Amino acid sequence: MFVQAITLAIGLLPFTLAAREFTNHGTKSGWTTTYIDKNTNGYVEDSTSVSYGGSQSLKFGQEYLGSSYTGRYHAEAIYSNGYKRDEEKYYGFAFRLHSTWEFDPQSYNIAQFGADFSDIKWNGQSCDDFSPTTMVWLNGTKLFTRTKHGQMIQGQKCPPLDNKGDCSQGPNCQVIEPFQLQSATSNIGEIKAGVWYRLVFHVKWKSDNTGIFQAWLNGTQVADRSGLQTTLLDDHREYEFRVGLYANSWYDEKKMIGNQAQRQLWIDEIGVGTTFADADPDEIKKSA
């Protein structure tokens, strides 16, 4: 009876197992959705040609359409529960550029967070539409990222549309702080074509000066920042986490530099969670 009582008591104790919030082993299934700009030749597809973990990965592609096309160039997989302000999470994935990737001085985004702010209005005017906060991009052979702070609050004045980064122009401002991902002790951060890389980053999403941003490339720390604002002051809305290919310079600069109009990359072993191991592609592939 005594042993039985102990067993019953143990059975009544709360018991939880640590688990990743989100895991994907390089497949289109399991994501909230995918997004490809209309009228482009972009694609998101399952690929068996290369992989970091198992037998397949996600392949993303876009094609420059010339100066007559004035839209954007997204081809991304989307996880809708990226973060809310005041949360703290780890994110990670493995990525590989096509073996013939041309390293031109333009930006090609491989991951980003963003939310729809079209409901934030002042006198009936929307202050913004879909607004990305942190982004991770390649320019030449180097990786860059950024933080964004400011605010997006219903009923607050919008700044001029071409001056959103100037907080003196209106309360709903968005100030961008870009920086390079690089190691203080090695040349890691120089990306090569046809090679798999593991990227993990840890963010404490704060609109005041208590935020944290850390990143690791192939296990080497390439960013370690604290005491900073890492997101907008908003109404605690949900931000998406997107991975893939967004050729943002083609839109922002209204041109393509170089000769490679078709771009391709692969992403595999994606994870989101509360620990480094939750987001580490090497750990994620073990669970496949």
Image (spheres, rainbow, N blue to C red):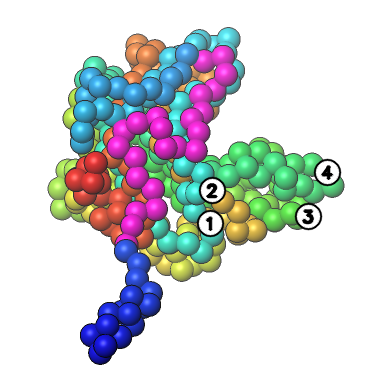
Residue behind mark 1: 84
Local packing at callout 3 (Cα closer than 10 Å; few below 14, some 14-19, many 20+) is: some
Mark in the foreground, 2 or 3 = 2
Q: Are marks 1 and 2 in contact (CB under 8 Å)?
A: yes
Q: Earlier in the sequence, mark 2 or mark 3?
A: 3
The magenta stretch is: 18-40
Task: Determine the residue located farthest toward the bottom in the rendered image.
Answer: 2
Residue flagged by tag 4: what amino acid is it? Gly
Q: Are marks 3 and 4 in contact (CB under 8 Å)?
A: no
Residue behind mark 3: 155
Q: Which mark is residue 124?
A: 4
Q: Which structural element holds mark 3?
A: loop
**Distance CA(mark 1)–CA(mark 2):** 6 Å
Q: Which structural element holds mark 2?
A: strand
Q: Earlier in the sequence, mark 1 or mark 4?
A: 1
Residue 33 located within the stretch drawn in magenta: yes
Q: Are marks 2 and 4 in contact (CB under 8 Å)?
A: no
Q: Which mark is residue 239?
A: 2
**Distance CA(mark 3)–CA(mark 4):** 9 Å
Residue flagged by tag 1: what amino acid is it? Lys
